[in-house]
Amino acid sequence: MMKLFATAAFATGLMGLATTSSHAECGTVTIANMNWQSAEVLANIDQMVLSNGYGCNAELVAGDTMPTLTSMIEKGEPDIAPEAWVNAAKEPLDKAVAEGRLLYAVPSLSDGGEEGWWIPKYFADAHPEIKTVEDAINHPELFPAPEDSSKGAVYNCPAGWTCQITTGNLYKALGGDEKGFTLVDTGSAAGLDGSIAKAYEGKEAWLGYYWAPTAILGKYEMVKLGFTTQYDKEAWDKCNAVLDCKDPKVNPWPVSEVQTVVTTSFADRAGPAMDYLKARQWSNSTVNKLLAWMTDNQATGEEGAKYFLKNNEDVWGKWVSAEAAEKIKAAVK
């Protein structure tokens, strides 16, 4: 992952915009800078908005899901985890929230974290009858495999990832082999991405696993297939997510809960800055497009945040007060 650097000159410029009273009210706030692209850029957006618009002394600190959430639960620091995939520590987080030590400010991803089987948008438009994974698995002729065009292809998640297990179990539950398909080993994330890019270049059919938010879905418009069944947590935990499960069910992926987690010690002193954090929510589509720009331009999280604030006021303007918006626009010119 790209590393983020907040330059001293930039931080000084941001702090200079704050009034003495608002700076004193908000004070120093630490923001967890997680080590994946979407979390990095959101942390930088928060740092710029809180520093520019609300007079906070906002600092980025290195973070990752479990170490950051554990530290917030046990020590009350850092103050903010902008993109926390909370399922990894749901029970202790809920306990800390119930005890008044932490709070969930807002689901940072309005769609949640998404996983599933996807097809290209141009293919979905040409084949409106393919709306679900069950529809797709009944038509191997529409998705010819690269090594054997007499079979259909489902592109799997990279080896060693949990999604390789869940995709394999869904394929098994759907009777992929019996329906005339083969499960394609993509080898790596780059291999999976490359298969989508190749399909798009030739306007070819493609069917396989992917997740959001991601840069690849910002660059290539894809449609997630539905299911005719509802999510069954018990079946998922006992079988669908278990390697070599003998009898998996057709079971959609659960939506991952992604929250902005805040310490109550910060929330109590944040004043209007807390209004921003409670409103700051974006869609996977918005994130996908930003990540695609960052990837194409080899941009850091800081550069991605500046680009977003310069070009997407229609999105972030709804998160902040009019006064804060003017300060932010002036700072990122």
Image (tube, helix red, strand yellow):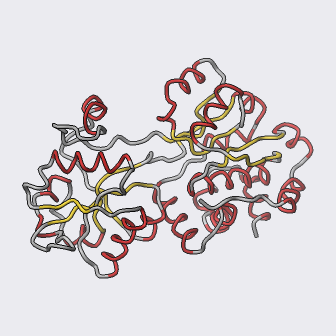
| Point 34% across, 70% down: residue | 196
Q: Image quarter for residue 279?
A: top right
Q: Position of residue 300 (x, y in %)?
A: 66, 65
Q: Quadrant of the N terminus?
A: bottom right
Q: Quadrant of the C terminus?
A: bottom right
- Residue 272, compared with residue 265, is above or below; it is below
Q: Is residue 7 left or right of residue 299?
A: right
- Residue 235, compared with residue 4, is above or below; it is above
Q: Image quarter for residue 259?
A: top right
Residue nearest the viewer, comparing 314 with 286: 286
- Residue 247, compared with residue 120, is above or below; it is above
| Point 15% across, 52% down: residue | 134
Residue nearest the viewer, comparing 322 with 177: 177
Q: Image quarter for residue 241?
A: top left
- Residue 155, compared with residue 254, is above or below; it is below
| Point 12% across, 65% down: residue | 140
Q: Position of residue 175 (x, y in %)?
A: 11, 50
Q: Is residue 157 left or right of residue 170?
A: right
Q: Position of residue 116 (x, y in %)?
A: 31, 52
| Point 74% across, 33% down: residue | 266
Q: Residue at the top extreme? A: 99
Q: Is residue 254 left or right of residue 52?
A: left
Q: Is residue 191 left or right of residue 330?
A: left
Residue nearest the viewer, comparing 257 with 179: 179
